[in-house]
Image (cartoon, helix red, strand yellow):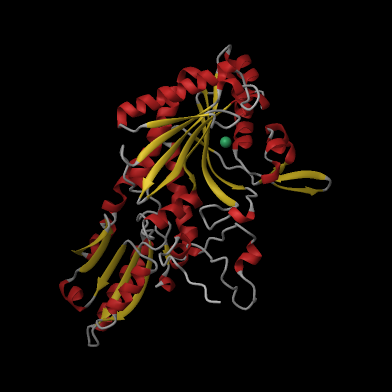
Amino acid sequence: MLVFKLNQEKDHMDYAYDMDIIVRPEAEVPGLNREFGYYMGIGIPLFSIGGGYLRSSIYQILINFHARRGYYIAETPIISSSSLFELSGHLGFYKQNMYLFQVENRGYAIKPMNCPFHLMIFLNELGKYRSRLPLPFKIFELGRVHRLEPSGSVYGLLRARSFTQDDAHIITPGENAVDVVKEVFDEMLTLYSKVFGLEVSSGSVRLRLSFSERDKIGEEFMGDNKEWEMAEGFLERAANEIKERYGISYTKAVGEAAFYGPKIDVLMKIGEKEWQLGTIQFDFNLARKFKIYDLIREVFGGIDVYIIHRALLGSIERFLGVYLESFRGRLPFSIAPLQFAVLAIKAGDESDKKVEDVAKHLHEELINLGFRSAYRETSRTSISGDVRLIESRVKPPVIIYVGKREVEKGKLTASIYKGGKRVQKLYDPKDVEALPEELEKEVLEVSGTVPRIPGDLSHLI
Ligand code: ZN
């Protein structure tokens, strides 16, 4: 039977594959007669070379972005004793989603969430430094988690069993809670717009406040009335101030809160679809289980503290999937696997040697400067076909042409993708270092750094 692909549009996995970001799970491993997915397991994406650069670049940006905003940076283990998740309560209510195993008669868990580790770090700091520890305490991690999602619901990068959260936990006194929520929201908008170039406006972003149902507090919703009232009050006050400041509206979903606390989800329209990206969640469960209320009271006296979970992008994998699909594989310069394609255009005469030298030198210099570049030789007759192929696959933000004309003038032609189209400009080769300045300005502004992870990716084009 013939199976017709009804939708001829590429999906995020097609783009990710073309850009060498990911290994296709359904592709056969050369020589092994089995698919990659067979060896990797269901829902466990294997990132390829381009994906490695992309992820590392995003990490650098996000780590600096958060560190500049007062978050401490954590990196916690993937595996721990299952006792940790017994303490957090996950073994009780989340067991069916966890990878658990026994070694030397002891139970271990692969972490489905980063929170218990962050709280362990917080308890250690609080025990050691007592009231010197500043509150609110904010701790950030690009935390790789594994969750046993039903195999039928797993789909590419959008819903994987192995993914990386841009995860932070904030332990805040009640009096700072509204400001903390507003700050997190500002961080979200800044990240979306400045690093990823997303349009942030009252038309594209809305908030959903998931609250408890009053008469189910204590049963379906854990904790007491006062806690819920306070936390929901903080969220609503913050949402009102956000509405005033940005014109971004919110809706309330009563009874939709998690059992452990109320939350705000950020919904964003990208292209035609609306996606849930960031989330800010209060949690009364963990604070109790980890005895944080007691210790805080002992150290700081009778203050109320709240634990907030928050993620700005959600998961790196899912965000990437959404982004690739929405922008047809066009990634911001700072994180693009391949940033430059340098094309030597040969004319078939004595100028070829010089063209080749200049282009190769440029390619090497870009790598020395910390960029990822690919070099390719082409001719006047095949160049348009070559560029079409490069544009349909790896999509480097900058294509540099070096031909006879350029060499004679001592210039190069750079074709820069920005704002949905390519703009061509003549440059002096010695200005090549300054060429991405415009493309990286905003990333530099908000994270204080631009990633420099060099690589020769000539084999991709
Ligand atoms: Zn958490």
In the foreground, 203 or 190: 203
Q: Which quadrant of the render holds ligand 1?
A: top right
Residue 243 in sight in this render: yes
Which residue is at a point 35% across and 51% down the rendered structure image? 271
Would you say residue 84 is visible in this rendering? no
Seen from the viewer's position, the closer of residues 218 and 66 is 218
Q: Position of residue 208 (x, y in %)?
A: 44, 34
Query: Viewed as shown, does residue 412 lie left or right of 209?
Result: left
Q: Residue furthest right?
A: 105
* Extreme residue toward the top, this view: 302
* Image quadrant in which you'd find residue 216: top right
Residue sitting at 56 percent across and 61 percent down?
46
Q: Which of 41 and 248 lies nearest the eye of the viewer?
A: 248
Give the vertical position of 85 relative to 270 (above or below): above
Residue name at image x 40 percent, y 38 percent: 188
**Percent position of residue 191, x then y:** 38, 42
Query: Residue most toward the left?
Result: 409
In the rendered image, the vertical position of residue 232 relative to residue 383, given as above or below:
above
- Taking the image as shown, residue 335 lies to the left or right of residue 215, namely left
Could you tell me residue 291's position as x and y percent?
A: 66, 23
The quadrant where residue 402 appears:
bottom left
* In the foreground, 160 or 216: 216
**Rendering coords of residue 367 (x, y %):** 38, 63
- Residue farthest front in this picture: 1
Name the quadrant of the N terminus.
bottom right
